[in-house]
Image: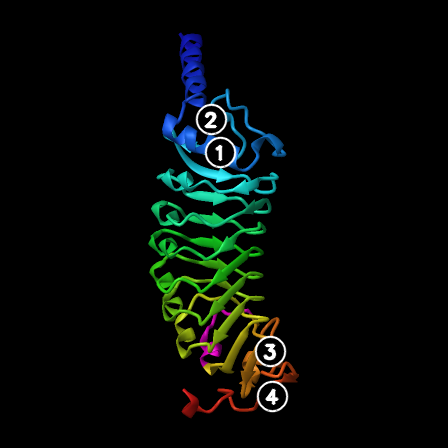
Amino acid sequence: MKNIVTLFLTVVFSISLLAEVPNSEKNILIKLYQSTNGDQWKVKWDLNAPVSTWHGIKIHSDKVIGINLSNNNLVGTLPAAITDLKNLEELNLFKNQISGTIPENIGKLKKLKVLNLSFNKLSGTIPNSICEIPHLNTLMIFMNKLSGELPNHIGNLKELEVVSLFNNELSGPLPASLYELKNLKELMLSSNKFSGQISWNVEKLKALENLSLFDNKMNGHIPYTIVKLDNLKSVNLAYNSFSGTVSQALAQKEDFNLNMINESGIAFKLEVSDNAKGVLAADE
């Protein structure tokens, strides 16, 4: 009897391993394979084998919930159809050679939690629809060729903890809604073309641990309210055009650098004030 039960469980387990996703989802994955030169991937898919055996694909309840093809020599573009994988929770295509743009309808991925398209050759803008992904926790698209401004409604992403967009060509002011991200821990926007000032509302980012705006075109005073962020460990605001003075408390933060560049391209250093606030309250 015991052997029969064991055999039964083995058969059930084997069947579950071979459980197939719907043809509609399989066809989307095949489109991804074809549009990114799948025959040249480091780890290829056997399109005749069950999807559950395909490298980097995570399945739960016969639905595709994860795609992790990082560092796998994907060359080509992302098919728009990828946004029809309604149950997708993770899309990780880090360190490939994907070009073209981010699908405009990426906001259709309502269950997405992790989006990592970093270290590719993506161009164009960050689609506004990205602000419609309610449970997005991690947004990483650093080291690409993205341009344009951050979506105005990025503050709608209440569960965001990581925003890492450094080394692109993003520009414009930081959206006011950005300061509503109370769960944000990392804001990494260095080496872009952002302009304007840091809002005094930066003090609302209570969970912030790492802030990097290094090498942009930002100006104005650095708000003394930054030092009210108890969890803040690392700050890098260098090589912008910030002016005025900064408090000792801020200057002593990890990675803080006093070097700035004025509008004429001449380097200068901010002064450190003995005043606990670093700038006059009147500037607020």
Q: Earlier in the sequence, mark 1 or mark 3?
A: 1
Q: Quadrant of the N terminus?
A: top left
2 and 1 marks in contact (CB < 8 Å):
yes
Please state the horizontal and vertical placement of residue 153, each as a whole percent of the image. 35, 63
Residue 34 drawn at (x, y percent): 52, 32
Mark 2 vs 4: CB contact within 8 A: no
In three-dimensional space, the C-alpha distance between marks 4 and 3, rounded to whole angstroms, equals 13 Å
Which residue bears the numbered disc 1? 57
- Whichever of callouts 2 and 1 sits on the residue coming sooner in the sequence is 2
Q: Earlier in the sequence, mark 1 or mark 4?
A: 1
Amino acid carrying mark 3 in the image: Gln
Question: Callout 4: 10 Å neighbours few (<14), some, many (20+)?
Answer: some
Quote the CA–CA distance across marks 2 and 4: 60 Å
Contact (Cβ within 8 Å) of mark 4 with mark 3: no
Mark 1 to mark 3: distance in Å?
A: 45 Å
Circle number at residue 271: 4
Callout 4, which amino acid? Glu
